[in-house]
Structure formats: C-alpha cells, structure tokens
Amino acid sequence: MRKEEIKEVVKKEYAKIAQRGSCCCGPTNSCCSSAEISEDTIQEAMGKKMGYTDEELKKVPKGANLGLGCGNPVATASLKEGEIVLDLGSGAGFDCFLAANRVGNEGRIIGVDMTPEMIERARENAKKGNYKNVEFRLGEIESLPVADNFVDVVISNCVINLSLNKRKVFKEVFRVLKPGGRFMVSDVVLLKELPDFIKNSIEAYIGCLSGAIMKGEYINTIKAAGFREISVIDETPFPIECMANNPTAKAIVEGLKIPFEKIKEVASSVLSTKVCAVKPGKTA
C-alpha cells in the first residue's frame, strides 16, 4: 500500500473513532471489561493504564478521553503558568484540557489533528468544558499550522509513530518551538524489527505497531532535527494483551492466520516510551 493510501486509511479509521466515541478496543471488545461494563468505565480503565490519575480523568469534559495513547505526556512535561503548549494529534482534546488546567488563564493550548471529525469533537468538548484558552486546528504534524518560534512546549501521545515521515515531524517541532523550548512525547518504539506480516498490516499500522521504528533511529531522528538534552524518561512494554479481543489484533490473527501467542512474542520487542528534548537557545 502506498504512503498516500495508508494516510487516508488511518484518517478514515480515526474519523470512525471520533464518531463512535470510543477507542479501538471499543465498549464490547475491550481487554479491560466485559460487554456489560459501560464505555465510560472502559475508557477510565484505559486512562489509568496509561498513567492518568483519577483526578485528571475527572477534570476533563465527558467524551474527551477516547482511551487512545500510550502514556501521559502532560504529567512529565513540567508545564508552567502562562506557557503556550502545542499538542500533536490532539484527538478529542484530552491532553489539551489537562494541559490547559496547568498553564492557567494566561497560558494557551493549541491542538492539531488531521481528522476533521476529531477537530469537531474536540471543539465541542472545549465548549462543554468552557475552555477559553484552548483552540484546535486542522492540519498534519508533518506541516504544522503554527508560526515559527511560537510555542514553549510540544506534547504528543502515541501519534508520531503513525507518521510516514518522522524526520519531517521533528523538524517541524523544532521550527515551532521557541529557543529553549522543550517537547515531551509518549510514543511506541521497537527493540528489534517487526516481521513482515506485521509491517504489511494496515490494521497493525492503525493499532500503532507497524508504523513504529527502532528506538535508536527514533532518538537519532530527534538529534538530527537539532534537539539537545535528549532523554528517555520511562519505558514500559507495549500492552499487547489489551489487544487480545479488539479489532486490530483480530484482523491480524484471523486474516493472516497468525496465532496470538506469536503476536505476543512480537510484542516483546515493542516499547511504550516517554522522550523529552530541548531546542538550543535562551527563552525570552
């Protein structure tokens, strides 16, 4: 499948998630629950698994947490009052709203997402929560609709792995950050190359597996963009068991006749990681 086709499929699938209002696990196919448990309970459980606290989960408007992501970048971004924060792949606005609570009324949050349905849902959530310091812009993370040297902090949650040009993404992050600005991303990286049956699976791409690159390559891409003080803050195994009953894993297992045990073996080389770095220069 060509890059343009992959991008369109990813956009289409995430549009479905925005309209459905649930993560890829879905209310009846989640590893976290049975069909009798509500969608809200499932998404809360997924949020906790990713590192969000009860307090954080209760602070955001209902419908902002879609159970997407692989970490909590806001928790480790050390946001300060008055800062301008950019969220790459902002989805329904979950991390944006958490960040808004930290930067206060003098701060500003910009969420960028390539899916119109996600932007629409995020804007509705911002109205519900009466967030005056949050805005959402339609755009791609490889070509951010943000001015040069404009933001203090960039965050992202399990989105850069979906990009087909990660080098360009990090160059764009470098461009929009002020000198001395920083980024904090949660993402998926690899310890060893994935087998072809995963690499060639569009379902695995949507599920944040086949778009991931080697950890060393990921760090070197950040370095090549000009960043310094690059640090891996935390690493945890990718929770492949949470895919046991969801559509992503089912499509791979059933469509390609791959035993789930084989999928688990592959997952041992997949990490959920938190990476931070700084753009050289002095803050204003």
Image (spheres, grey):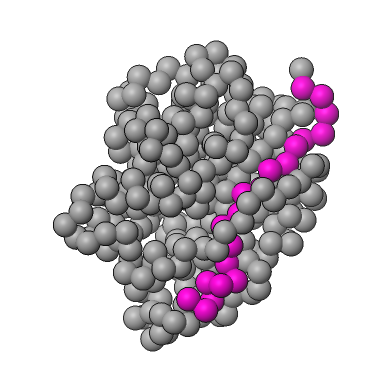
Coordinates of residue 32 in the picture (x, y in percent): 32, 59
Q: Residue at x 74, y 62 (%)?
A: 216
Coordinates of residue 249 in the picture (x, y in percent): 39, 71
279 drawn magenta = yes
**Residue at the extreme right of the image, as rendered:** 281
Horizontal relation, residue 116 to residue 174: left or right? left
Does residue 169 lie above or below 251 as drawn? above
| Quarter of the image with the C terminus in it | top right
Horizontal relation, residue 193 to residue 117: left or right? right
**Residue at the extreme front of the image, as rendered:** 54
Residue nearest the observer in this picture, 107 or 58: 58
Q: What segment is highlighted magenta in the picture?
A: 264-283
**Residue at the extreme left of the image, as rendered:** 36
Quadrant of residue 103 within the rendered picture: top right
Residue nearest the observer in this picture, 110 or 107: 107
163 drawn magenta = no
